[in-house]
Structure formats: structure tokens, C-alpha cells
Amino acid sequence: MSPARIAIGQYVPVDSPVHRLNALAKMGLVAAFTAALFLVHGFAGLAAAGAVLVAAIALSRVPAAAAARGVSAVAVIVAFTLLANGLRWRPATALVRVGPLALDAAGLRTGSFFALRILLLVIATTLLTLTTSPVEITEALERILRPLRPLGVPAGELAMTLTIALRFVPTTAEETERIVTAQSMRGARLDSGGPLARVRAWVPVLIAVFFNLFRRADDLAVAMESRCYHGGEGRTSMRMSKMRSADWVALLAGASMLIAMGLML
Amino acid sequence: MRNPRVLTMVETALCVALAVVLARIVVFEAPQGGAVSLEMLPIMVLALRRGARAGIIGGMLLGVALLIFKPVTVHWAQVVLDYPLAFGVLGITALGSRAWRAAVAGGPTAAAVWTVIVPSCVLGGLARFVPHFVSGVIFFGQYAPKGQPVMLYSLLYNGGYMLPATLLCAAAAALLLPALERAVPAAGRA
């Protein structure tokens, strides 16, 4: 690992109508968008979905480059989809031939359709995390899980655990980075040698990181207990996220439009 | 003495935070180009120290956290299969939890490391591989032309990074856990 900063999180904190929309409504819209992508029959449907996505990105005021950041992670999958569908072994007709392999027009069209669908899906989910803070997503998840409480699902406990986890990601990243730098200055070779040698070099770093982690857990548990936290039912929240009527309108109108688009195009 | 429920919840949260950080650190580049990290290690450690409930909850929340921080979704089923489910079943590592705690009570030995930690971690890694494999079969079944060996594709794609990641995490857990038990013992804190 290089001592460069460990980049965590993608949320872009700007004020926009998309940012102001409740996380639950945004998650519902992304689900409807996904359903629409799997319902469309042809390129016209994908073009319409792409136009909706471009409008949403423009409305969100996040840089287009940030929205497209997730695309690099699926480059191999997109390339596979294109080639697996487009390449043929000695076909009768072909666009380009390289030895016995050839690019087939119909296969390439199918591959492009699938590849475009993947790209739109990745950009849509990236846009959700670019415009919604992790805490808002956690609150929305708690709300989604709340109906499962009678079945024994500890919705409140899960949400609290995730909230603490997300809160401590930057702190843990900074601490890990500090220990990595300290070990590197002592001559530890964390990014050279075979896999087992690297793991062995990482162990002193991990021992220090885990040691601090369990110590911090002790302190945090004491702090929470001394403030009478006991988990379970009846816990209130300082900040309550509520679905306003504008959120409901955006969710219902947007989801209906997307599903109709998926069915018609 | 802490309230065990609160302490376990906080330890779970902090292990999830550490796993998110470790997910961003590439320890080793696999031969086919996949990045291998130690993201599973905190959940494996948590499962062995605190048992199945903490391991499964920690794993599921890690899946959700990774979905929040770096979502890569190429088909709908993947949202559940590749994230909360795959990391949740990593909690199966806790099958060795009781044996490890018994070994710790009597002083951890090299034999306990090889007979408890390593097999438990490998089992946890294998359990995580299953949902990824199913997700891969669905993905390749949907996007590859008919008649292609989708199971083989999924096996190669997912096995390519899961096998080295599991072995590296098992090795790291074997080196780490005995030292960790001496420094911050799990028993007596909750």
C-alpha cells in the first residue's frame, strides 16, 4: 500500500433538489430506474433512460466526472459483455475478421445493449451515493427494516451499529494511515515481496490497529452506557428524517413514469 | 464490567469501519489483475472473538457499507447477493468461535491456530464465495450469449480473487489473533 491518503466515501455535499430529496424516495427511484432498465426492449428505451439520468445529474449539480467514476470499476465486465456477444468463430458474414475470429454485427448490437444497460445502472447507483450522505442512507435503511421488527430483526440496533461504523470510517482510515507511515519509516516493506511476506509485514500494523480499535470500543461503550444507552425499543433520534409530501410526489410520479417508460419503449 | 450487548455492538461497528478502510488497501495484485485486500479480516476476527451473531451482523453491515461507499451494481440480484448476503455468511467463521475461546482459556497453542483459526477462516471465505458464485451465474447467464459455460466463467472470475483473499486473511488471522488475545482479551471485557 502506498502511504498516499486512503480515499473513503463519495458524497458530494452541495445544495440541489436531488440532495434535498429524502433518501428513501431516492432509493425508491433508483429501484424503479433499475426495473425500467430491465423492462426496456430496445435502444430507444435505453436512450430515454440515459436522458433521465443526464437530467438527474444536471439537477444534482455533482460533477459529471464524479458520476462516471464508477464506470472504471466495471470496465472489464463491460468489455466482456461486448466481446462475448460480438465475437464469433468463423461466421458467414462479419464486420471485421482477425484470423478465425470475427466481429458479428448482430452480436455486437446485443452486446452494446447489455453494456449500455450496465453503464446506466452503475451511474444511477453512483448518483445515489453522490447525493445522499451515509447517515441519510442508514436512516432510510432503518425505516425499510422497521416493519421486520416483529420478526425479531433488530432494526434499531442495526441502524445504530451502521451509524457508528460510518462515523468511525474516517477516524480509522487516518489512524491506519498513521500506523502504516510509522511502520514504513521503521523499514517495514508493506508493498514488496510475495503475498505471505506482505501479510507478515502487515501483522504489526494490524495488531496496533486492532489494539486501538478494541480500546476505543471500550471507551465508547462506557460513554454510551453512562448516557443510559441500552439499545432496544423506544430509542429516539435527535434528527428525524421524514418523507414530506414533495418526496412522496417525486417518488410516486417518478417511479410511475420510469416503469411506464420501461413497458412502452 | 461492560454491558456485553453494548460492547459487542460497538466492537461490531468499529470492525465494520476497519473493514471498509482495509477494502481500500490493496495488499496484493492477483495474477489475473484482481486486487486482493484484507477486508474480510476484521469480520473473521470479530466472529471468532464474539460469536456468530456479531459475525453475521457485522458482515451484513459491511456489505451495506461497501454498497454505500463504492457501489458496483451490474444487475439487480447483485445488490443482495454480492453485498449483505455474501458478507453476512462470512459470519460462519464463528463456527470455530467456541473452540477458539476454549483454547484461549487454556493458553492459545500453535495447534489451536492450525486446527481452529485457519479452517474457520477458510470456511468463512468459502461461504462468502457461494453468493458471489450464484451472482456471477445470474450475471453471465443474462449477459453472455446462450450456450456459454456461465458456471465456469463465474468460478474463474470469483475464484480468482476469493481464493487468494481467503488464504491471506486466514494467514493474517492466524498470526494476529493469539497476539490480540494477549493484548486485549475478549473474555472479561464483556
Image (cartoon, coloured by chain):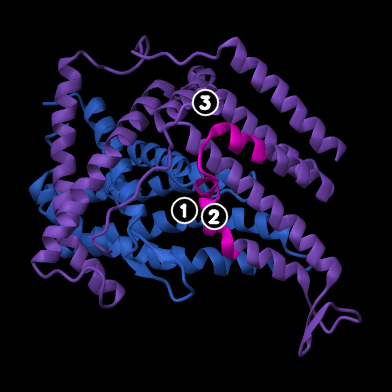
Chain colours: A purple, B blue
Secondary structure beneath label 1 = helix
Per the model, the C-alpha gap separating discs 3 and 1 is 29 Å
Quadrant occupied by the C terminus of chain A: top right
Position of residue B130 relative to residue B27, above or below, is above
On whether disc 2 and disc 3 are found on a single subunit, the reply is no
Give coordinates of residue B130: x percent, y percent: 53, 55
Q: Is residue B114 left or right of residue B94?
A: left
Tell which subunit mark 2 falls on: B
Provide the residue designation for mark 2.
B132
Secondary structure beneath label 3 = helix
Position of residue B123 relative to residue B19, above or below, is below
Crowd tier of the residue under label 1, counting other residues whose Cα lies within 10 Å: few below 14, some 14–19, many 20 or above: many
For the magenta stretch, what is the residue range?
A53-76
Q: Residues at badges 1 and 2 in contact (C-beta under 8 Å)?
A: yes
Q: Residues at badges 3 and 1 in contact (C-beta under 8 Å)?
A: no
Provide the residue designation for mark 1.
B128
Provide the residue designation for mark 3.
A23
